[in-house]
């Protein structure tokens, strides 16, 4: 057989094999692999979408908690306490109405020069939110000059955080935890722990827990 005949025979056999196409088994395997790939991609997409939706629901609550905790942290690090100064303040617990409050004197003011004085008294209170229809609470913040004759009533309270479920503070001194504190009677604590619970847009509770170590400032 000549070389030309061999070449022609090879191309005829190759064309004949290609013309047969894929077998049913090959088609089924290809479909199965494609289905698995699509299912995996869909699962990843669904997971990412659910995570994004959850972050969208939680973002406002996380932002609000970060703002109020950062503010309290700055005020604690700027605390002004002097045993010989009756104007200095550090107290907290429950007031006469059973509402949570926390008050301190600090140099971390919103306005750096209130009536020419760089020290202020800051007070946080947790009260029932009258603007809420589902019994949630609001944290109010009041700031007034530490020195001066003006009373707290002369300075309006600011709605610091809304949609609050709970807000509690514990004080640590010599490894003892206390929910009530008065610097005039108990001196200076070692640490303060804040537990805050808010609601996200879906109504789910989101807890936050943080602690601040008191700096050693002022004269004792």
Image (cartoon, rainbow, N blue to C red):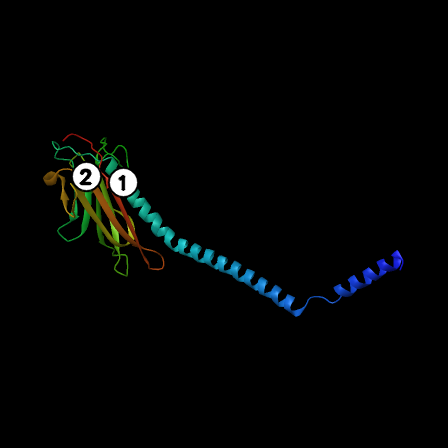
Instruction: From the image, tell me which residue sits under label 1.
Output: 73
Instruction: From the image, tell me which residue sits under label 2.
Output: 190
| Quadrant in the picture for the N terminus | bottom right
For residue 108, the mark is: none
Secondary structure beneath dot 1 equals helix
Q: Mark 1 or 2 closer to N-term? A: 1
What is the x, y in percent for residue 143?
23, 41
| Residue name at image x 11 percent, y 40 percent | 186
Residue 99 falls left or right of residue 24: left
| Residue name at image x 25 percent, y 43 percent | 211
Q: Is residue 17 above or below residue 186?
A: below
What is the x, y in percent for residue 73?
27, 40
In-front residue for pair 89/66: 66
Q: Is residue 172 above or below residue 16?
A: above
In-front residue for pair 13/156: 13
| Residue name at image x 56 percent, y 64 percent | 35
């Amino acid at each position: 057989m000549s070389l030309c005949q061999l070449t022609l025979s090879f191309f005829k056999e190759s064309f004949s094999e290609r013309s047969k196409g894929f077998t049913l088994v090959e088609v089924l395997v290809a479909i199965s692999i494609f289905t698995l790939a699509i299912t995996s991609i869909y699962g990843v997409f669904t997971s990412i979408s659910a995570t994004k939706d959850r972050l969208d629901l939680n973002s406002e609550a996380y932002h609000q908690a970060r703002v109020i905790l950062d503010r309290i942290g700055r005020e604690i690090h700027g605390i002004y306490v002097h045993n010989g100064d009756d104007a200095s303040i550090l107290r907290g617990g429950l007031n006469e109405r059973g509402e949570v409050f926390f008050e301190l004197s600090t140099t971390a003011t919103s306005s750096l020069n209130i009536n020419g004085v760089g020290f202020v008294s800051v007070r946080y209170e947790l009260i029932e939110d009258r603007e809420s229809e589902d019994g949630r609470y609001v944290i109010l913040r009041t700031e007034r000059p530490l020195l001066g004759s003006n009373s707290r009533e002369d300075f309006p309270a600011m709605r610091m955080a809304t949609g609050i479920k709970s807000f509690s503070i514990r004080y640590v001194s010599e490894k003892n935890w206390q929910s009530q504190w008065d610097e005039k009677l108990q001196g200076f604590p070692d640490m303060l722990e804040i537990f805050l619970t808010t609601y996200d847009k879906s109504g789910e509770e989101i807890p936050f827990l943080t602690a601040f170590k008191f700096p050693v400032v002022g004269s004792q």
